[in-house]
Amino acid sequence: MDDGYQGRGIISGTPLYMAPEVARGEEQGPAMDIWALGCTVIEMATGYPSWRDIQDPVTTIHRISFFEDVPKFPYNLSDDARDFLVRCLSRDPRKRWSAEELLSHSFLKRSEEFPKECSPKSTLDLAFWDSWFEEEERDDQDEVETDDQRPRSTQERLRHLVSGGLPPLHLADV
């Protein structure tokens, strides 16, 4: 049955991650997910939403739709990370890289150099629960994280988040 719907005219999604073409009610497709990935990488790197200077969803949608802005990149990103974000956050969806292309990007290839942390795959993952109980026994005393203990670089923050650490309570403005 053809009802004439071709993915146009409907706006759906979370405004902070919405691609320009989606915010304008135009086409929706895989490229919109690549835009959202770029926004997510910025949030993971900074601890803040990619459009953190905008508080109101309507203003966010308007800015994403009709201005030539892209989210600001953190100042301390590597050249590879910046290039990765450029490929994700092109305002023209036809110029955004596909997921397959991004998986071959040097930014992700470099991540293979870092040690892998064990992460639970389900609530029944015994190794995860065993390590949690061991940590609980070691951490009988409350510790306050100081500025010296916080990860400083983007890579350290990402590694800290991925390894199960809580995001810092106070981040310096970036």
Image: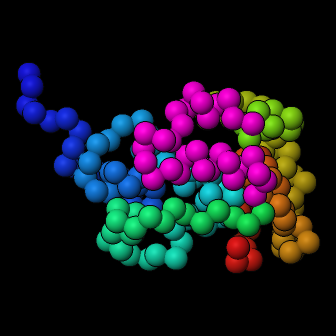
Q: Is residue 136 visible?
A: no
Placement of 75 over or under 157, stated as above or below: below
Q: Nearer the viewer, residue 99 or 138?
A: 99
Left or right, 125 with respect to 72, comes to: right
* Rendering quarter of residue 31: top left
Q: Is residue 62 left or right of residue 112?
A: left
- 39 over 122 or under it: above or below: below
User: Which quarter of the rendering shows the N terminus?
Assistant: top left
Is 10 or 90 nearer to us in this picture? 90
Q: How many marks on residues? A: 0
Closer to the camera in the image, 91 or 167: 91
Coloration of the structure image: rainbow
Q: Residue at x 69, y 64 (%)?
A: 74
- Closest to the observer, 56 or 107: 107
Q: Magenta segment: does it hold 95?
A: yes
Query: Is residue 101 a member of the stretch shown in magenta?
Result: yes
Q: Residue at x 60, y 30 (%)?
A: 101
In the rendered image, residue 37, in percent from the top left (x then y), is placed at: 54, 46
In magenta, the rendered stretch is 77-106
Residue 147 against residue 93 in the figure, above or below = below
x, y percent for residue 173: 70, 77
**Residue drawn at point x = 86 percent, y = 38 percent:** 114
Q: Residue at x 50, y 41 (%)?
A: 96
Q: Residue 4: x percent and y percent?
A: 10, 33
